[in-house]
Amino acid sequence: MAPSSDDFVLLMKARLEKWTVVEIASKPEEADAILTCQTESAVVPAKVAVRRMIAEVTLLDRRSQKIIWKTTKSSFSDRTILADDILEQLKQDWRRSVVAY
């Protein structure tokens, strides 16, 4: 996979900003964690050609560079739905981690 296009990163950032549990730092050195996105697009042969997008999103601890959270999702629909699915997975996993403590 390749580093994500800026528009997918902006989609993820916009969704994170609406989720009031996290705060987006203006500079990487001010952040506790760094979210990275890698995407891949492919045309899938079918009766009608369909574009499939795969996104791998990783949340890293900024200081230790250890993975805090990671998911890979794909969608045959548009990238906004894929970004929504990824954020929903992050929210679910975050809720489970809070309950575990």
Image (cartoon, rainbow, N blue to C red):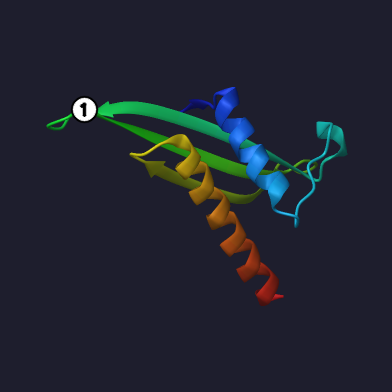
Q: Quadrant of the N terminus?
A: top left
Residue 33 vs residue 80, the one in the foreground: 80
Query: Is 15 placed left or right of 47 in the picture?
Result: right
Q: Amino acid at mark 1?
A: Ala
- Residue 66 visible in this rendered orientation of the protein: no
Query: Is 85 placed left or right of 36 in the picture?
Result: left
**Residue sitting at x 33%, y 39%:** 76
**Residue sitting at x 64%, y 68%:** 95
Q: Quadrant of residue 54?
A: top left
Q: Is residue 75 above or below residue 100?
A: above
Element carrying mark 1: loop
**Residue sitting at x 87%, y 38%:** 30
In the rendered image, residue 38, in percent from the top left (x then y), is placed at 52, 32
User: Which residue position is annotated with label 1?
Assistant: 49
In the rendered image, residue 56, in percent from the top left (x then y), is placed at 50, 39
Q: Quadrant of the C terminus?
A: bottom right
